[in-house]
Every structure is written in structure tokens, then in C-alpha cells.
Image (tube, helix red, strand yellow):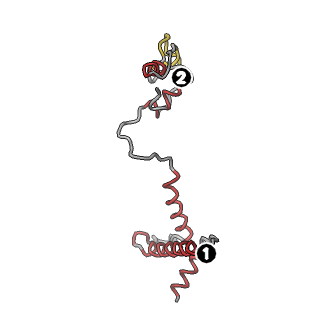
């Protein structure tokens, strides 16, 4: 009975008590707490996680928090669905580019591409653009679109 009492004691310290009308939910959460305690005991017995010198062993609370944070971390990041693209990301999308006067007036690159694709009626001339990219771009719409969207037209 000593082991069972010790397990119940640990579980009651940080138990998840959710009041519910469904009996099977209470049973599920109780089993989950028992599972967490058993994992903690196995963690302490593992030769890879033995204490070194005078360092104290990980407490049950620290172990519980580490489990919770590791489970949550997978869902907190900004993720995309599907496979990663094999094509490299263009530098215009990840580097910081600033608008500047490029020189003489010329056709805006984004407007030209939109007219070619049939999504816009007329193109514009501008003397502004991006020195790093070497493209003439209207301010602020076309400059922002060119540097934030992969498919801007």
C-alpha cells in the first residue's frame, strides 16, 4: 500500500479537477494523472536523467509543466499546411528593402505584370522603386505588393 498511497499523494498535489456530469470524463482525467505520475517515476529511474553531484532531481511540478509546455509548443508556432516548398524563397520577400528614387521615369514592374496578366487596365510610370531589386515600383501599393507577396499579379 505504500506505493499506492505515495502515488495518490503526488497526483492530488496538482490534480486536474474538472467538474463534469459525464462519469467517463472524470475517469479519463484520473487515468491521465496516473499516466503522468508513472511517466515521472520512470523519468527519475532513467539512467539518462540521473542527478549529477548536488543538483536536485526534477520535481513533479516541473515535470508536469515541461510536459504541458512541450505539448503546447507544437501548436503555438505559425505553421503552414502541407509539404515545405522545395523552391527557395526570393530575397525580396525576406530581406528589408527601402523605397528610393531609382532614376529616370520608367514603367512600374508590378503594373506591367498585372496588365500582361489581364488583371489591370493601364500601367503607370514612376521614378521610385527599390535599389536592391533594381525595379521601378509605384509607391506604396506596388512596392508593398512586390516585397510581401510571392505572386503579386
The residue drawn where x is 39% and y is 44% is 84
Disc number for residue 2: none
Asked which quadrant contains residue 22, the reply is bottom right
Q: Earlier in the sequence, mark 1 or mark 2?
A: 1
Q: Are marks 1 and 2 in contact (CB under 8 Å)?
A: no
Q: Nearer the viewer, residue 3 or 80?
A: 80
Q: Up-down: is 89 above or below 136? A: below
Picture coordinates of residue 111, whole percent (x, y): 48, 19
Q: CA distance from mark 1 to mark 2?
A: 59 Å
Extreme-bottom residue of the structure: 1
- Classify mark 1: residues with Cα within 10 Å, few (<14), some (14-19) or many (20+): few
Residue topped by disc 2: 99
Extreme-right residue of the structure: 19
Question: Please, what secondary structure does the residue beneath circle 1 have?
Answer: helix
The residue drawn where x is 55% and y is 24% is 141
Q: Nearer the viewer, residue 57 or 95?
A: 95
Picture coordinates of residue 133, whole percent (x, y): 44, 23
Picture coordinates of residue 38, whole percent (x, y): 48, 75
Q: Nearer the viewer, residue 134 or 109?
A: 109
The residue drawn where x is 43% and y is 76% is 45
Q: Up-down: is 77 above or below 30? A: above
Extreme-left residue of the structure: 86
> Tag count in the figure?
2
Question: Please, what secondary structure does the residue beneath circle 2 have?
Answer: strand
- Classify mark 2: residues with Cα within 10 Å, few (<14), some (14-19) or many (20+): some
Picture coordinates of residue 31, whole percent (x, y): 52, 75
Residue topped by disc 1: 13
The residue drawn where x is 50% and y is 11% is 105
Amino acid at each position: 500500500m505504500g506505493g499506492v498511497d505515495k502515488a495518490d499523494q503526488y497526483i492530488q498535489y496538482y490534480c486536474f479537477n474538472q467538474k463534469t456530469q459525464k462519469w467517463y470524463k472524470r475517469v479519463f482525467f484520473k487515468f491521465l494523472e496516473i499516466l503522468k505520475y508513472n511517466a515521472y517515476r520512470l523519468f527519475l529511474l532513467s539512467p539518462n536523467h540521473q542527478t549529477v553531484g548536488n543538483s536536485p532531481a526534477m520535481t513533479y511540478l516541473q515535470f508536469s509543466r515541461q510536459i504541458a509546455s512541450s505539448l503546447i509548443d507544437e501548436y503555438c508556432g505559425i505553421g503552414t499546411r502541407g509539404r515545405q516548398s522545395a523552391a527557395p524563397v526570393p530575397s525580396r520577400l525576406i530581406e528589408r528593402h527601402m523605397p528610393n528614387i531609382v532614376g529616370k521615369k520608367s514603367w512600374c514592374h508590378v503594373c506591367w505584370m498585372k496588365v500582361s496578366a489581364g488583371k489591370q487596365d493601364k500601367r503607370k510610370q514612376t521614378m521610385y522603386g527599390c535599389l536592391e531589386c533594381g525595379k521601378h515600383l509605384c509607391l506604396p501599393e506596388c512596392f508593398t505588393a512586390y516585397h510581401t507577396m510571392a505572386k503579386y499579379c
